[in-house]
Amino acid sequence: MTNSAILIRVFAICIVLILLRGLANAQDLSTPSADGSSVYIVSPKDGETVGKTFTVIFGLKGMGVAPAGVEKEHTGHHHLLVDADALPAPGLPMGADVMHFGKGQTETSITLEPGKHTLQLVLGNHLHVPHNPPVTSEVVTITVE
Ligand SMILES: [Cu+2]
């Protein structure tokens, strides 16, 4: 395939993705979050240095944890973003680019390469969709040794 044929193909795929996203946006799958609710990373703390494999402890106030698939008002399950550039799109299920804790876990053990990394939590509803307004934690920056 020539370079221009590849470019045209990439362009066509982009258009299809944009159209699909537009269709999905028309159907907002979010559910309301509770007033004053918040999610936060208990550990590690912002600025902390940790070993390659470490435990991340999730905290949640004002809402409850429920497994994925269980539809109950003001509940959700945790999603961990590692080194994410942006928050997940509103109204849409979060994908494989975030870690899902659909069994209702409130902590996890992860292994990262040495260096600086960021961690952030986003609560998602029974359909893995961020709530409205979204419940997101502060970004925690850590150094992995
Ligand atoms: Cu999920």
Image (spheres, rainbow, N blue to C red):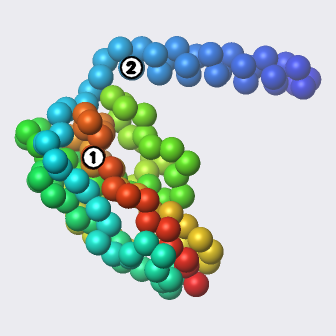
Q: Is residue 66 visible?
A: no
Crowding at label 1, few (<14), some or many (≥20) Cα neighbours within 10 Å?
many
Q: How many marks?
A: 2
Q: Is mark 1 within 8 Å of ligand 1?
A: no
Q: Position of residue 140 (x, y in %)?
A: 44, 65
Amino acid at dot 1: Val
Q: Which mark is residue 135?
A: 1
Q: Position of residue 114 (x, y in %)?
A: 61, 77
Quadrant of res 39: bottom left
Looking at the image, residue 55 lies above or below residue 30: below
Task: Give the distance between the C-alpha atoms of the residues marked 1 and 2, in whole angstroms.
Answer: 19 Å
Q: Position of residue 38 (x, y in %)?
A: 22, 53
Amino acid at dot 2: Asn
Badge 2 element = helix
Badge 1 element = loop
Horizontal placement of 31 versus 82: left or right? left
Q: Residue at x 68, y 16 (%)?
A: 12
Q: Disc 2 marks which residue?
A: 25
Residue pushed farthest front? 36
Crowding at label 2, few (<14), some or many (≥20) Cα neighbours within 10 Å?
some
Residue pushed farthest left? 72
Q: Is residue 74 visible?
A: yes
Q: Residue at x 50, y 63 (%)?
A: 118
